[in-house]
Image (cartoon, rainbow, N blue to C red):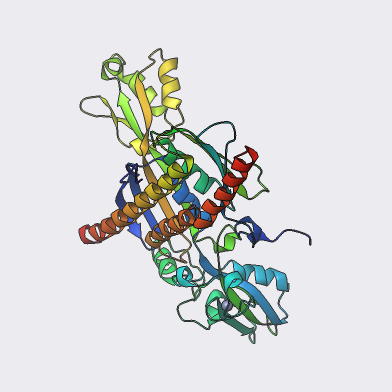
Amino acid sequence: MNAPDRYERFVVPEGTKKVSYERDTKIINAASFTIEREEHTIGNIIRMQLHRDENVLFAGYKLPHPLQYKIIVRIHTTSQSSPMQAYNQAINDLDRELDHLKNAFEAEMVKFSRDY
Amino acid sequence: MEGQSYARMPRVKIRELRDDYARFELRDTDASIANALRRVMIAEVPTIAIDLVEIEVNSSVLNDEFIAHRLGLIPLTSDRAMSMRFSRDCDACDGDGQCEFCSVEFHLMAVCRNDETQDVTSSDLISSDHTVVPVDYSESAASIDASDGISGNKKGGITIVKLRKGQEVKLRAIARKGIGKDHAKWSPAATVTFMYEPEIHINEDLMESLTLEEKKEWVESSPTPVFEIDQVTQQVMVVDAEAYTYDDEVIKKAEAMGKPGLVEINAKQDSFIFTVETTGAIKASQLLLNAIEILKQKLDAVRLSEDTVEADDQFGELGAHMRGG
Ligand SMILES: [Zn+2]
């Protein structure tokens, strides 16, 4: 009867930003990104992509609580980059990988239907 | 500004492809991508399912809620789902969720007039949109009939309720777009799994120090048929590496036989074998393509926007102010 609506898990409430970030006050080039209404699917691919960036000294994500529908991504970079730059690049690189995967799968489907 | 790209170029090889089933290899990527695709295929690729039921008459043995629940679980052909609107963001019907952009209407009318029990099935549902109809399993059911003689429902539909003489069901149902995360009835996936490709190396020198009896004993210690003994050369060979379930039995057996290192098995960290099976709501190949599209949309939504940058500038200014700048 007083159960929260199921869509609260994935619909960002009005007036709430999807992404926000806060710079670390003590460490230079470190920041925490709060992503609303996302979980392991996004958190883990961003983290693993950040690990491929040589300017990233630390990248991790956490789901603070199963009933708080948000994740926190923490990034620490060298002075050659910044957490925001690394974050943006990770997303661009993942987007490019998925574009490539889509084309590769479509080409393979054509090849498969021809060969078999 | 634009740094170098760290993007990978994954490769795909299809092994088997049918309408509702696909088996393919995914290489040159990592487990995070494989797992993200699996998770999106199960819980975030949209389909259409019955979400609202208005019952006019129900004198069957099943109560109204029971029937409404069963209707919700019927897979509907959902090729339209990707381009449809979610009722909650539909402005054409103002949250009513009953317009053509975000819903499909169904009617069901059934009365039993005979002495014989009557099956009310998904094929009795009348749709307002010919592209959104209950998935027809009659073709696959017919092939099962022919192969092993199991006779299913004659009409091929999914049984909703059975009526005896004089009983009646009459209802109107609204189907909407949704995702598996909201309710499992919207999940297009029956199975989505991936496994790491195993790499098996047999230490031939050590293997040759075993007698034929010992080889047989070792080969049989695997719960799945991974190894075989060549009839002619009496050598142990890998016949099906992918049958290995990472159970470690053959490794333990080798140790127990006093031959540690007889076999080395590693999971390749960048190669995955996917098995995808759908409910029939969309094709298996389309499920993967839609999952890629949804994942791209999700990534796009978490990009830093002008808004986020501005918020930071304010914070930066405030920070500068607090530092006395
Ligand atoms: Zn609407």
- Which of B286 and A13 lies nearest the eye of the viewer? A13
Residue at 21% x, 57% y is A115
Q: Quadrant of the N terminus of chain B?
A: top left
**Residue drawn at point x = 36 percent, y = 24 percent:** B264
**Can you give x and y, in whole percent of width and height, for residue B15 in the image?**
30, 51
The x, y position of residue B77, in whole percent, is 47, 71
Identify the residue at the far right of this view.
Answer: A1
Q: Quadrant of residue B166?
A: bottom right
Is residue B136 visible in the rendered image? The answer is no
Q: Residue B11 or B321: which is nearer the viewer?
A: B321
On screen, residue B73 above or below B126: above
Image point 66% across, 43% down: which residue? Answer: A65
Q: Quadrant of residue B168?
A: bottom right
Residue closer to the observer: A32 or A23: A23
Residue B184 occupies quadrant: bottom right
Quarter of the render that holds ligand 1: bottom right
Q: Residue at x 36, y 42 (%)?
A: B29
- Asked whether residue B206 appears in the rendered view, the answer is yes
In the figure, is residue B198 to the left or right of B312?
A: left
